[in-house]
Amino acid sequence: MRLLLIVLVAVLLAPAAAAADTIEVAAHLQNQNVAGLPPKGRSGNAYSAVWIVRDRHARTIGDVLLDCRWVNASLRLCVGQLSMPLGTLALIGASRTSLIGQLAVVGGTGVYAGASGTVLFDAIGLRRYIVTANYHT
């Protein structure tokens, strides 16, 4: 009975999990580069890109930098950052297609220091994406 009371008190006093913060911005691909590296074919190829990030009023507020490398013909590893006025989110992830999809948030700077979560890239047109970051700090 005493153990049950201790567990109940610990549960009641434990801090509630903080709700995730969400950022949603528009990104327009400004520049990309694909470098064909050995071996022949897609394996080893490198992809780099820069997106301009805009707020809901179409004002430029930052950018996304992304570098990917095909590990083999069907898997690539990407690292990058989403930079905005109050700081930067550090991103990493893998994809089996040439689409970006979802990356993990593995840290940040400024108000995003210590952030973790996910960033989803949704294509909405040619060279245009909606970027949604769900993160905790």
Image (cartoon, rainbow, N blue to C red):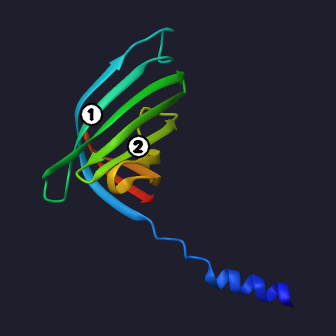
The answer to whether residue 95 is above or below residue 104 is: above
Question: In the rendered picture of this protein, how many numbered marks are placed on residues?
Answer: 2
Instruction: Identify the mark nearer the N-term, 2 or 1.
Output: 1
Provide residue 76's location: percent of width, then percent of height.
50, 29
Q: Secondary structure at mark 1?
A: strand
Residue denoted by label 1:
50
Looking at the rendered structure, the kind of residue marked 2 is: Ala
Q: Nearer the viewer, residue 21 or 34?
A: 21
- Which quadrant of the figure has residue 14? bottom right
Report how far apart the C-alphas of labels 2 and 1 lie in the structure. 15 Å
- Which quadrant of the figure has residue 79? top left
Provide residue 38's location: percent of width, then percent of height.
48, 8
The answer to whether residue 91 is above or below residue 30 is: below
Q: Residue at x 41, y 39 (%)?
A: 100
Looking at the rendered structure, the kind of residue marked 1 is: Val
The answer to whether residue 58 is above or below residue 47 is: below
